[in-house]
Image (cartoon, grey):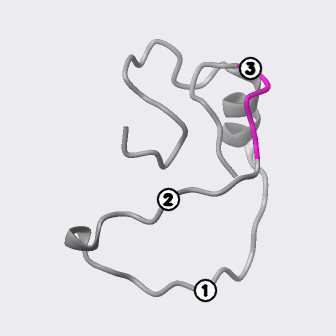
Amino acid sequence: MTVRIGKADSAAVGEVPEPPATDGSVLVEGLLTGICGTDIELVSGHFGSGRPGHGPVGDRA
């Protein structure tokens, strides 16, 4: 799941490229997911607006 910070209704499910091997590695197992108030602000485009240069959450761009 990705969202573009500051852009309303930009939530999407899609492929995200693997980070470079030079960043190291971590093995994780997802157990639970949920939605909180911050998630709602992100999807509505209100959270983090005005932060130039930020792509999708988790994006390295």
Vertical arrangement, residue 12 with respect to residue 41, above or below: below
Residue sitting at the far left = 22
User: Where residue 33 sits in the image (x, y, percent)?
Assistant: 75, 67
Residue at the spot of label 3? 8
User: Where residue 2 sits in the image (x, y, percent)?
Assistant: 65, 45
Whole-Å distance between the Cαs marked 3 and 2? 23 Å
Which element type, helix, strand or loop, lies under badge 2?
loop
Closest to the observer, 38 or 4: 4
* Magenta part of the chain: 8-12
Mark on residue 17?
2
Per the picture, the main secondary structure of the magenta-coloured stretch is: loop
Vertical arrangement, residue 26 with respect to residue 15, above or below: below
Residue at the spot of label 1? 29
Nearer the observer: mark 2 or 1; the answer is 2
Vertical arrangement, residue 60 with respect to residue 25, above or below: above
Q: Is residue 31 magenta?
A: no
Residue depicted at x 39% and y 82%: 26
Which element type, helix, strand or loop, lies under badge 3?
loop
Q: Looking at the image, tell me whether mark 1 or mark 3 is earlier in sequence order.
A: 3
